[in-house]
Image (spheres, coloured by chain):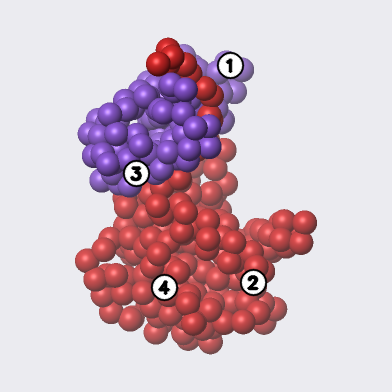
């Protein structure tokens, strides 16, 4: 038998979830949908932010949302006030959403002719970071009441997201929130990460967020048709 | 513990390559970045199990650890970072602006016998 020799291969190893996420991304592409997911700790204001986003987008866009929680359909009920189609994923004891759960949820449900689908993950700053859901943009939300050093304590969730949203800006003064320090900490865990500051309550910063969504939509459409 | 499913994917990938080239694979060389989220020892332990009963049975998994490499705008240079958590330049302490390497999970070579 001949001597062993090395041949170059250079192939990325895809994890099981990545394969499913890749299928989802293809499906979203075929349907022309832009998909945004949200991760954060419990109580950071994901649902309020999303409700406001759905309401503001509704006049001009067809939107829908999936929302994951361990128990209850409370969030779906809240989001449904925006009049957008909303579906709750109850995960039981599972602490995150994965691509297969998203696939199961959209089968026979995903409305026709949709512009945006939002996926609100289970409130958890650890586990959701490892699971690609086929989204185009992943937001990590951090409320001003949580402390400026949270990105340093939970680096992976920031590192795997695309944009950081600082929420509850209306409370910033009351809790003496140090925005530059928080932004510096975010950039330590993800260099160059985009940061938006918003208050779903007062509406501050929401316009900049909607602008970001329309450029994302334009980018998606350009790649979809190209 | 997703290392077993990753080991299965590695074995599958190597099996396909081996079948395509009609060769026997004796070792799989993998680049594993410190930011890949994969635990080296767990992957090595899973590999043997994953390869059992396949064409890769008895082969070795050779792992090359890839440290995190970042670009520091302060030094205008690439810097190897100690950890895999905080991205601060070890020399001037500025936040680094770009991660150049460290996310790899790549089969880059196969050791084969014809």
Residue for point 43% across, 80% down: A87
Chain rendered red: A
Q: Chain of mark 3?
A: B
Q: Is residue A143 above or below residue B17?
A: below
Residue located beneath label 1 in the image: B77
Q: Earlier in the sequence, mark 4 or mark 2?
A: 2
Whether residue A65 sits left or right of residue A225 in the image: it is left
Residue located beneath label 3 in the image: B8
Residue located beneath label 4 in the image: A104
Query: Do the residues bearing badges 4 and 2 touch, measured as CB atoms within 8 Å?
Result: no
| Cα distance between the residues tagged 1 and 2 | 43 Å
Indicate the colour of chain B.
Answer: purple
Q: Is residue A39 above or below residue A73?
A: above
Q: Chain of mark 4?
A: A
Judging from the image, what secondary structure is the residue with disc 1 in?
A: strand
Residue for point 64% across, 64% down: A29
Residue located beneath label 2 in the image: A31
User: Do the residues at pointers 1 and 4 share their chain?
Assistant: no
Query: Do the residues bearing badges 1 and 2 touch, measured as CB atoms within 8 Å?
Result: no
Q: Nearer the viewer, mark 1 or mark 2?
A: 2
């Amino acid at each position: 038998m001949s001597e062993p020799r090395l041949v170059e291969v250079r192939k990325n190893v895809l994890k099981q979830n990545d394969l499913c996420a890749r299928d989802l991304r293809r499906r979203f592409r075929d349907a022309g949908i832009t998909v945004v997911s949200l991760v954060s700790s419990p109580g950071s204001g994901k649902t309020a932010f999303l409700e406001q986003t759905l309401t503001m987008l509704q006049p001009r866009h067809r939107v829908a949302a999936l929302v994951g929680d361990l128990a209850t359909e409370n969030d779906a009920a809240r989001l449904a006030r925006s009049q957008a189609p909303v579906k709750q994923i109850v995960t039981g004891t599972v602490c995150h959403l994965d691509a297969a759960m998203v696939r199961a949820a959209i089968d026979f449900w995903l409305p026709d002719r949709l512009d945006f689908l939002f996926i609100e993950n289970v409130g958890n700053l650890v586990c959701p970071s490892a699971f690609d859901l086929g989204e185009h943009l992943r937001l990590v939300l951090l409320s001003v009441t949580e402390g400026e050093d949270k990105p340093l304590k939970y680096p992976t969730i920031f590192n795997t997201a695309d944009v950081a949203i600082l929420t509850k800006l209306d409370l910033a003064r009351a809790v003496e929130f140090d925005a530059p320090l928080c932004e510096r900490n975010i950039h330590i865990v993800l260099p160059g990460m985009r940061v938006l500051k918003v208050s779903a309550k007062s509406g501050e910063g929401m316009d900049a967020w909607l602008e970001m969504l329309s450029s994302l939509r334009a980018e998606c459409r350009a790649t979809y048709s190209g | 513990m997703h290392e077993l499913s990753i080991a299965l994917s590695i074995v599958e990938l190597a099996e396909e390559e081996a079948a395509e080239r009609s060769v026997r694979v004796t070792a799989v060389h993998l680049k594993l970045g410190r930011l890949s989220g994969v635990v080296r020892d767990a992957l090595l332990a899973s590999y043997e199990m994953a390869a059992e009963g396949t064409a890769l049975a008895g082969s070795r998994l050779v792992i090359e650890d890839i440290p995190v490499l970042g670009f520091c705008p302060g030094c205008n240079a690439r810097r190897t970072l100690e950890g895999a958590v905080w991205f601060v330049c070890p020399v001037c302490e500025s936040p680094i602006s770009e991660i150049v390497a460290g996310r790899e999970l790549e089969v880059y070579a196969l050791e084969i016998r014809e």
